[in-house]
Image: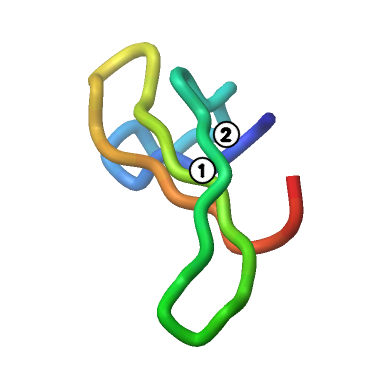
Amino acid sequence: MQGYCVKCRASREIQGAESITMKNGRPATQGSCPTCSTKMFKIGKA
């Protein structure tokens, strides 16, 4: 799944992506950037 890395300022593949549910009940995907290891987050169904 693609996500946006704020530190690299580029769209990258999310490494170790896992589906989560936010506090308000919406689905999201969480993982890390393969280049800089910064936490990445994307709202929406995977």
In the figure, 36 relative to 27: above or below? Answer: above
Q: Secondary structure at mark 2?
A: strand
**Mark with earlier residue (1, 2):** 1
| Residue at point 65%, 33% (across, down) | 2
User: Amino acid under label 1?
Assistant: Tyr
The quadrant in which the C terminus is found is top right
Given residues 33 and 26, the one toward you in this image is 26
Residue behind mark 2: 11
Q: Give the side of residue 23 with respect to residue 29, left or right.
A: left
Label 1 CA crowd tier, 10 Å (few <14, some 14–19, many 20+): some
The quadrant in which the N terminus is found is top right
Mark 1 and mark 2 residues within 8 Å of each other at the beta carbon? yes
| Residue at point 45%, 43% (across, down) | 30
| Residue at point 41%, 80% (across, down) | 23
Residue behind mark 1: 4
User: Amino acid under label 2?
Assistant: Ser
Label 2 CA crowd tier, 10 Å (few <14, some 14–19, many 20+): few
In the rendering, at what x and y percent does residue 15 appear?
46, 19
- Marks 1 and 2 sit apart, C-alpha to C-alpha, by 4 Å
